Amino acid sequence: KFGGFNDYRGGGHSSGRLTVALVAAGVVAKKVVDAIFLEAKLIEAGGMADIEMAINRAVEAQDSIGGIVECRVTGVPVGFGAPFFDSIESLISHAVFSIPAIKGIEFGSGFAAAAMYGSMHNDAITESSGKTATNHAGGINGGISNGNELVFRVAVKPTSSTPRPQQTWNRDTDSVESFEVKGRHDLCIALRVPVVVEAVTAIVLADLKLIG
């Protein structure tokens, strides 16, 4: 597809290094939306809330693990986004999926909402500003920010570069063979993702602010 210019070994657009540019742009974007506060953090790794224990287990297993990164944004004005293609969820998702290894995203209650009654999921408005008693919607209604805290989580897959022996097809021998990845590789790339999530979120919000 790329005329032989892609680096199949994990470089170029297959590398997390490309996120350096996103983070740099995010620094500028945060200055544009200086009244908005963003914070992303790793809340789960390898299916565990105890990040350190999860990392230690990965080291012992000599295998990679993924994680869940949660982003919370306060100070988002009412009215960012649109009901259809340019919903704030669509724009954030588009940006977030530019980060390598992201495999899923959910806003507010996310997939848990599928198991709720509507009366349980509804966020009761408690004052004229639009503040709600709960925030199952994650600060968004109908694709538009509602003034409450913007909350979303992303799933980061375990990196494919793991020290454990694996099986794959060798095109030179036309057979399935065992191989091992050599060199230094992070066992949990999710540790590096929060700062990038903050950056791309700031970029989207800066765009929405400038669009008006």
Image (spheres, grey):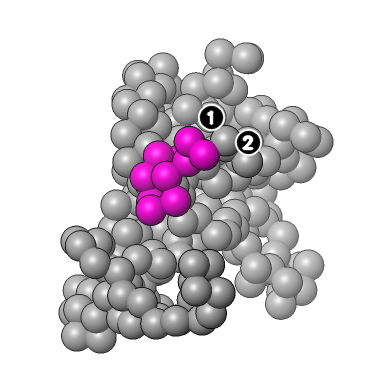
Using the image, tell me which numbered label, if any, was put on residue 91: 2
The residue located at (68%, 30%) in the rendering is 81
Q: Residues within 10 Å of mark 1 (few under 14, many from 20)?
A: many
Q: Amino acid at mark 2?
A: Leu
Residues at circles 2 and 1 in contact by the CB criterion of under 8 Å: yes
Quarter of the image where the C terminus is located: top right
11 or 107: which is nearer to us?
A: 11
Q: Amino acid at mark 1?
A: Val
- The residue identified by callout 1 is 204
Work out whether 206 lies above or below 98: above
**Image location of residue 154, percent across then percent down:** 50, 57
**Residue range (magenta):** 4-13
115 or 178: which is nearer to us?
A: 178
4 or 29: which is nearer to us?
A: 4
**Image location of residue 56, percent across then percent down:** 18, 79
Q: Left or right? Give the position of 187 relative to 82.
A: left
